[in-house]
Image (cartoon, helix red, strand yellow):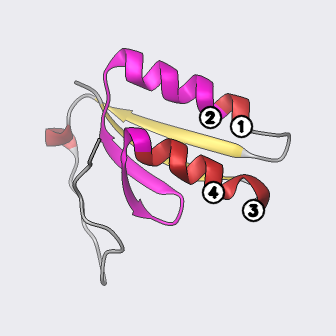
Amino acid sequence: MPYYIAVYDVNEKREGKMLKLFRRYLTWIQNSVFEGELTHAQFKSLEIEADRLMKDSDGVIFYQLRDERYVDRIALGEEKAERTRFL
């Protein structure tokens, strides 16, 4: 299953909605940064829902990796969230 890292930059009016949306699909790592495995269908749903929330000056970037095994994750300092996802 593909592994994703997602970041967004949206107007503060839409920040709460975008945070709720991304937390439904991925693990929250830091402000506007998420990661986790998604099926193709889950990714498409997230992509469509995020696009509906976005306005002109907003942006979302997805990095897709083949598998979590191909990620070397190095974190400095205290992490803001645990790396588990609850549905």
Badge 2, how many Cα within 10 Å: few under 14, some, many 20+?
A: some
Marks 4/2: CA–CA distance: 12 Å
- Helix, strand or loop for disc 2: helix
Question: Mark 2–mark 3 contact, CB under 8 Å?
Answer: no
Near-viewer residue (41 or 60): 41
Looking at the image, is mark 4 or mark 2 nearer the viewer?
4
Q: Does residue 35 belong to the magenta stretch?
A: yes
Q: Which residue is mark 4?
A: 16
Q: Which residue is mark 2?
A: 50
Upstream in sequence: badge 4 or badge 1: 4
Foreground: 17 or 83?
Answer: 17
Q: Amino acid at mark 1?
A: Leu
Position of residue 17 measured from the top left corner of the image (x, y, whole percent): 63, 49
Nearer-N-terminus badge (2/3)? 3
**Quarter of the image with the C terminus in it:** top left
Q: Residue furthest bottom?
A: 77
**Which comes before the other along the chain, label 4 or label 2?**
4
Question: Label 4 crowding class (10 Å Cα cut-off): few <14, some 14-19, many 20+?
Answer: few
The residue labelled by disc 1 is 53
Q: Compared to 21, does 40 lie above or below? A: above
Disc 1 is placed on an element classified as: helix
Mark 3 surroundings: few (<14), some (14-19) or many (≥20) residues within 10 A: few
Amino acid type for the residue under numbered disc 4:
Gly
Judged from the image, the secondary structure of the residue bearing numbered disc 4 is helix
Residue 12, numbered label: 3
